[in-house]
Amino acid sequence: MDNDFYEFIQSEEKSELFNQYSIVPNLVSYFKKVNEKRKNAFQTTPMLYLDNIQDETLLDILKYLGEDWREILIDHNIKVHLTNSNLKKQDIAARITKLFNEYSGDWSQNAIQAIVTLSEWFEYNKDDGKELFPELYRKRAELFMNTISDKESLYHLMKSNTPLSTLSEIAKAIENDPEILRIIEKRKQELAEEKERNEIGEAVEILLAEVLKNYGFTVEKTHIGRDLIIKCKGRINYDIEVKSTSSGGFVSLTPTQAITAVQKPKHYSLCVVHKNGQELTKQYVAENAKFVNNIGELIVNKVQDVQRFNNTQNALTIENGGIGILIENPLSLRYKVNSYIWASGSNLLSFVEKLKVMNNQ
């Protein structure tokens, strides 16, 4: 905005024109008269004020509370020399305090935003906060807490070992990309399902070991490539990988488990127990355990395919003429065993007979 126009009017002592015509812009770029005549008197009241607040944050807070003083403040770029009233920080502070005190009912989203913004303003303007907002500053913590409806989640945040700065970055990332929240929810569900599978699997391992001991076998627990090692009078070692499922769908083997099965095709079985909503007991496990005794033979081709893929992947990373491929995310895989394979496996009695035959050979 060119100030020459306004300087000319004032140099000609024609400032009354500011009251007769809407030619002075406010902070939202609307032109208004400086004063307005009352309908029932010759007195005038200000429509525009000089801005001695000079604080955008306080103006934002008041706007959240329903009043936009930018509409009644003269544009800072306009040099209008008036005896007109001006608005100061004390004025806006008094108005904000009054509106907060008059607020009733549940906090609206805008009111909550006003409190959050004011709380942040207090952090960076402690002296002004104490002077301008003595009442609100004293009860700032209470005011802030009253805006939080989900206090349980807040307590979780307060007890978290994750630094607040990290949680803040996560919140900003979610605001910028809401898809992140869906990914978090998916991962949360995966972890819950994995936890349930592990708990069920642990229970099945214990029960299966007890059942096999009743048949005279020695059972040892392990966690590298298999879950149980079965021995009978020291003559045989037989490995079992125990899986459980609640859905009755596929189960999966880790690369280590699959390789172990391939290396010991005659002495390795996959055991699957479908929980099916039933209580896990020794009897239930004995009646429902399914043993895939040839899992090493069934999976060998896929293990070889993965080995060839890994070899190709490693070859790609070798630089040739200064150019190579950087693989930033290593392949994470498991071997999927569909339900029709394990569901048709042998039962516990057949598996025990197999062990007895092997032990007598």
Image: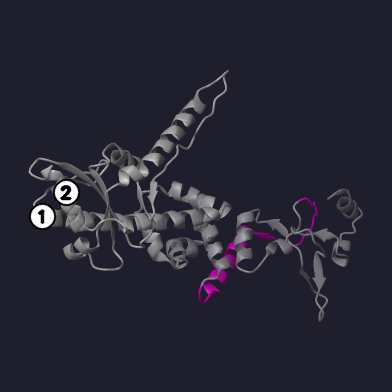
Horizontal side, residue 148 vs residue 52: left or right: left
Direction bottom: furthest residue:
40
- Is residue 72 in view from this perspective? no
Residue sitting nearer the eye, 309 or 330: 309
Query: Residue placed at 29% from the left, 47% from the top?
Result: 294
Q: Which of marks 2 and 1 is in front?
A: 2
Q: What element carries label 1?
A: loop
The image quarter containing residue 192 is bottom left
Query: In the image, residue 79 lies at what x, y percent?
Result: 80, 51
Q: Residue 238 carries which label?
A: none
Query: In the image, residue 18 lies at what x, y percent?
Result: 85, 62
Q: Is mark 2 on a helix, strand or loop?
A: helix
Horizontal side, residue 210 vs residue 74: left or right: left
Query: In the image, residue 230 lies at what x, y percent?
Result: 16, 46
Q: Per the image, is 212 magenta?
A: no
Amino acid type, residue under disc 1 in the picture: Tyr
Closer to the chain start, of discs 2 and 1, is: 1
Question: In the picture shown, does residue 276 fall above or below 50?
Answer: below
The image quarter containing residue 275 is bottom left
Direction top: furthest residue:
321
Query: Residue placed at 61% from the left, 65% from the top?
Result: 64
Residue sitting nearer the eye, 86 or 123: 123
| Magenta region | 77-106
Q: Per the image, is 80 magenta?
A: yes
Q: How crowded is mark 1: few (under 14 residues within 10 Å), some or many (20 or more)?
A: few
Where does label 1 land, which residue? 215
Amino acid type, residue under disc 2 in the picture: Leu
